[in-house]
Structures are given as C-alpha cells and as structure tokens.
Amino acid sequence: MEIGKTLKYLRNIKGITQEQLSIELSIPRSNLGRYETDYSQPDYDTLVKFAKFFDVTTDCLLGLEDEYGNKIQ
C-alpha cells in the first residue's frame, strides 16, 4: 500500500477531514492532499507527525506492516 492510501485510510477511520488533520498537525492542507494522492512524499519529520497522531509505526505508513504491527510480506 502506498503512503497516500494508508494516510487516507487512517484519516477516514478517525473520521476527520483533510482540513482538520492539516490544522491538527500544522501542515498545509494542499500538502496533505498531495501526500494522499502520492503526488509527493512527506519528509521524515512529517512522517513522524503522522505516526504519532494515528498511533501507528512509520513502518505502517511506509507499507511494511499493517496498523496492528504485523509485517506485510
């Protein structure tokens, strides 16, 4: 799963809009839209913000494991 699909999935599970997430994490909404469509990739600091907010690992965001910590083959 690409980072964008994972971000959108986690955001939808939490029931928040891109605008709400962008305000919460202090990142431009336009950047969040680009991340969710895989048009661009978040930098390390932003990736960590996402992981902390969604309470998942960066490996989950990178598609190396699921949101429960199980490795993806």
Image (cartoon, rainbow, N blue to C red):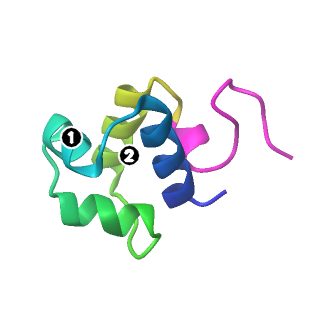
Say what secondary structure mark 1 lies in: helix
Question: In the rendered image of this protein, does residue 8 appear above or below residue 70?
Answer: below
Task: Tell me the magenta residue range.
Answer: 58-73
Identified at 34% across, 69% down, the residue is: 34
**Is 50 placed left or right of 30 in the picture?**
right
Q: Position of residue 58 (x, y in %)?
A: 51, 39
Mark 1, other Cα within 10 Å: few <14 / some 14–19 / many ≥20: few
Kindly identify the amino acid type of the residue bearing the numbered disc 2.
Answer: Leu
N-term mark: 1 or 2: 1
In the displayed orientation, state which residue is furthest to the bottom.
39
In the rendered image, which residue does mark 2 sit on?
47
Instruction: Check disc 2 and report its element: helix, strand or loop.
Output: helix
Amino acid, disc 1? Gln
Give me the residue at 19% from left, 58% from top. 29
Residue 32, percent from left and from top:
29, 58
Q: Where does label 1 land, which residue?
A: 20
